[in-house]
């Protein structure tokens, strides 16, 4: 585990502490079990809240991990042909595309790349921007030197709904936490907090799902997974990109 990850985790846990204190609780960060080989738990933190020890785990609201390799492949496949179009017509192009899931199959993916190139050729030939029917793909003619700027849409699901994008990105990691780290903590007698985090980890190419400042969107995405493991998470918190942490689901904090 890198220092960047530790620092990011510490920042998130401090935001949670601040949120609890703002609600009138006395809170102390008592330790990091995942950094202590001798500790029986592997959660990210132990918070003492009003005299009660809570197990806390931190989970990024990551984009789908298929996104980066899919976007890299698209850039590699599209750049040469689109540069050729730009130079043939003497124009500057800004081309947006949706990364393609490899599960779609080679034929479908290659057909999509050809459609992007064809759309760009039509735009360059007409001198007018063109937009695909999928709501993601477009070619815009812009002032500037001859060439191409490629913009990858941060969505591999083909679904514009944020809750779907969140579920695709976090589902596997959340399932693992609910069946391992957090279940072990619950079985050991700890009340459990889960902190979902929209802040991307420094140094990581994989970002987090954007435009999710509204906590209800996040809750709608993760609740089906939480419901499959009812009773594990007592409190669900969310740290958006801006503003304080939000309490999304409350099983109440026990008093000593």
Image (cartoon, rainbow, N blue to C red):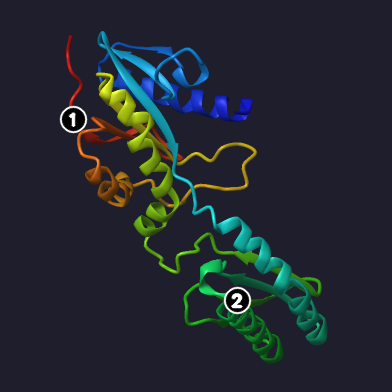
Q: Callout 2 environment at 10 Å: few (<14), some (14 to 19), or many (20+)?
A: few
Q: What percent of the width, then of the height, locates residue 234? A: 23, 30
Q: Is residue 238 visible?
A: no
Number of numbered callouts drawn:
2
Q: What percent of the width, then of the height, locates residue 153? A: 55, 64
Q: Say which of marks 1 and 2 sits in front.
A: 2
* Residue 126 numbered mark, or none: none
Q: What percent of the width, then of the height, locates residue 226? A: 27, 43
Residue nearest the viewer, comparing 149 with 162: 162
In the displayed structure, 183 sits above or below 211; it is: above
Residue bearing mark 2: 106
- Write down the quadrant of residue 26 in the picture: top left
Q: What element does badge 1 sit on?
A: loop
Residue nearest the viewer, comparing 34 with 21: 34
Q: CA distance from mark 1 to mark 2?
A: 47 Å
- Please report the residue visible at 74 percent of the width from the left and 78 percent of the height from the top: 82
- Write down the quadrant of residue 174 in the picture: top left
- Please report the residue visible at 39 percent of the width from the left and 40 percent of the height from the top: 176
In the displayed structure, 208 sits above or below 187; it is: below
In the displayed structure, 53 sits above or below 160; it is: above
Q: What percent of the width, then of the height, locates residue 146? A: 81, 75
Answer with mark 1 or mark 2, whichever residue precedes in sequence.
Answer: 2
Q: Is residue 55 visible?
A: yes
Looking at the rendered image, the quarter that the C terminus falls into is top left
- Please report the residue visible at 46 percent of the width from the left and 28 percent of the height from the top: 12
Q: Is residue 229 left or right of residue 112?
A: left
Q: Is residue 54 left or right of residue 57?
A: left
* Residue 251 numbered mark, or none: 1
Looking at the rendered image, the quarter that the N terminus falls into is top right
């Amino acid at each position: 585990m890198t220092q960047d990850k530790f620092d990011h985790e510490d920042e998130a846990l401090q935001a949670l502490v601040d949120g609890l204190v703002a609600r009138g609780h006395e809170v102390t960060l008592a330790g990091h079990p995942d950094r202590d080989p001798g500790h029986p738990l592997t959660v990210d933190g132990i918070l003492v809240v009003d005299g009660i020890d809570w197990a806390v785990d931190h989970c990024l609201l990551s984009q789908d991990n298929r996104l980066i390799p899919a976007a890299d492949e698209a850039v590699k496949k599209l750049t040469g042909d689109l540069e050729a179009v730009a130079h043939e017509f003497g124009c500057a192009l800004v081309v947006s595309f949706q990364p393609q899931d490899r599960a779609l199959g080679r034929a479908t993916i290659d057909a999509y790349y050809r459609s992007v190139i064809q759309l760009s050729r039509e735009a360059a030939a007409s001198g007018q921007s063109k937009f695909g029917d999928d709501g993601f793909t477009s070619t815009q003619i812009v002032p500037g030197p001859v060439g191409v700027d490629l913009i990858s849409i941060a969505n591999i699901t083909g679904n514009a709904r944020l809750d779907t994008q969140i579920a695709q990105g976090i589902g596997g990691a959340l399932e693992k936490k609910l069946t391992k780290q957090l279940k072990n903590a619950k079985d050991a007698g700890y009340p459990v907090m889960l902190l979902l985090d929209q802040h991307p980890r420094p140094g990581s190419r994989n970002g987090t799902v954007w435009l999710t400042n509204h906590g209800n969107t996040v809750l709608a995405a993760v609740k089906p997974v939480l419901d499959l493991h009812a009773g594990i998470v007592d409190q669900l918190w969310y740290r958006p990109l801006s503003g304080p942490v939000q309490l999304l689901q409350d099983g109440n904090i026990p008093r000593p």
